[in-house]
Image (spheres, rainbow, N blue to C red):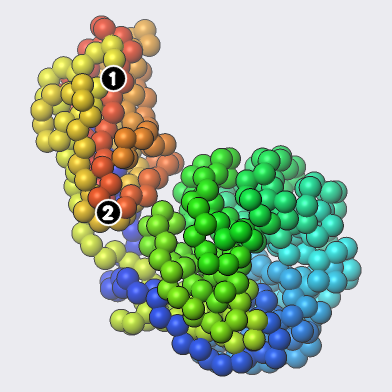
Amino acid sequence: MRTLLEILLPDTGELYTTDHGVKWTDLGAISAAEAAVMIAFGNGIAILADMGTNVYRTTDYGATWTDLGAVLNAAASGVYLGNGIALLTDETGHIFRSTDYGLTWTDLGDLGTAFYATLYLGNGIAIAGNTGKHIFRSTDFGVNWTDLGALTVGNIYAGAYLGNGIAILGDSTGRVVLSSNYGATWSDLGVIASGSIADAEYLGNGAALLCDDDGHIYRSDNYGATWTDLGEILSSYGSSFTYFGWGTVICTDGAGHVFRSTDFSISWVDLGVIASSPIHSSCFLGHGIAVIGDDNGHILRSTPAFGFGDFNPYQSELLLQFGCLGAITTNGTSYLAPGNGSTQANEITVRVPRAGILRNLYVQQRVASGAAGRTDIYTVRVNGADKTITCSLDNATAGEDTTHVVPVAQGDAVSVKLVSNDAADASEDVGATLVLV
């Protein structure tokens, strides 16, 4: 049997630098009011909407900004829907729509109270949650909206789309509601956070984040189904996440700090006071460039120190080899040994020398387990805990799990657990290779 976990990263030929989001340059006061909402359109185009009435636009990755004038009243949220179409909401309950990459805007009218959470779920479907606890849904790229009713306990302040039709919204009571059918219906997951949920972010492969008014960050590894409190990480109330890609994400707070993680939110570093006032908006523009906006209308910009490039492979693959020559230990739990030995009753681990991700479990056995439900279950473990990457073989020699991923930090202990459920299990010759990138 051969077990392979591997990461496939895009190869553009550019160098990956580890400084994304580390250093920030204050571009000065772009707006006279709080920089409340940012939306990136791609190709260096983005807009900033403030808590006054104005919208500002950049076409050079945030280096310079143009004032488009009065568009709305006190920006609340916004989202890009693709093909130049974007939505902006304000505190008066109006939704505004642009079809020309944020250059001009049309007021769709007053749909209720302030919409602080606006999501795009693909296929023309958009979601807007308001401070009246109602969720609105559009199926025509934001032209028309249907009120689904009051579906939360508190005011809706944050949300994220997790892919595959799955979306989450968080409210002022710390509660999260989840939809798995593109926002058509919603289920209440209960109180997740200790304070009002301020923002949400999706990191890919089922990993999602929340931050709250108590400075806590919460993480889900299973598309929002369950959540873990990572602790009081922030120095003040949370305000906004921005994901750069490949494990690097920042979170801003009400004290002007920027916190940064490079291991998919497992650990965080406080970069200190970056802005002179609370930071309420942030945005990734591509090519390693991000911008944040504070309460004084200042825009701060971060660029990679070593060139104009996106995240790319920065180290070669590292192979962690486990195996067992001969018959496996039947009818019980055992562990593969580093190298090629025999299955072990005691867990033997390999420590990873750097942070990264494990994914894509491929399993191949030379001899199948045998008929009548003699299953072999292979599970990846990190620091003594079973992870979601697993594969079960029932009288088969090959299988895979290409859905789940596991982020690991430097020094984490990795092993492969094998569970056989029958003494007559015939499986033998095991080789397991984990690829860390």
Q: Is residue 29 above or below residue 291?
A: below
Say left or right for 307 vs 403. Answer: left
Secondary structure, mark 1, is strand
Please tell me which residue is depicted at 78% across the width and 84% down the height of the picture: 53
Numbered label attached to residue 176: none
| Viewer-side label of 1, 2 | 2
Of residue 412 and residue 216, the one placed in the foreground of this image is 216
Check disc 1: other Cα within 10 Å, few if <14, some if 14-19, many if 20+: some
Can I make out residue 127 in this image?
Answer: no
Can I make out residue 207 in this image?
Answer: yes
Q: Are marks 1 and 2 in contact (CB under 8 Å)?
A: no
Please tell me which residue is depicted at 51% across the width and 89% down the height of the picture: 26
**Dot 1 amino acid type:** Thr
Secondary structure, mark 2, is loop
Of residue 46 and residue 330, the one placed in the foreground of this image is 330
Nearest to N terminus: mark 1 or mark 2: 1
Q: Is residue 108 above or below residue 413?
A: below
Q: Quadrant of the C terminus?
A: bottom left
**Dot 2 amino acid type:** Gln
Q: Which residue is mark 1?
A: 333
Numbered label attached to residue 410: 2
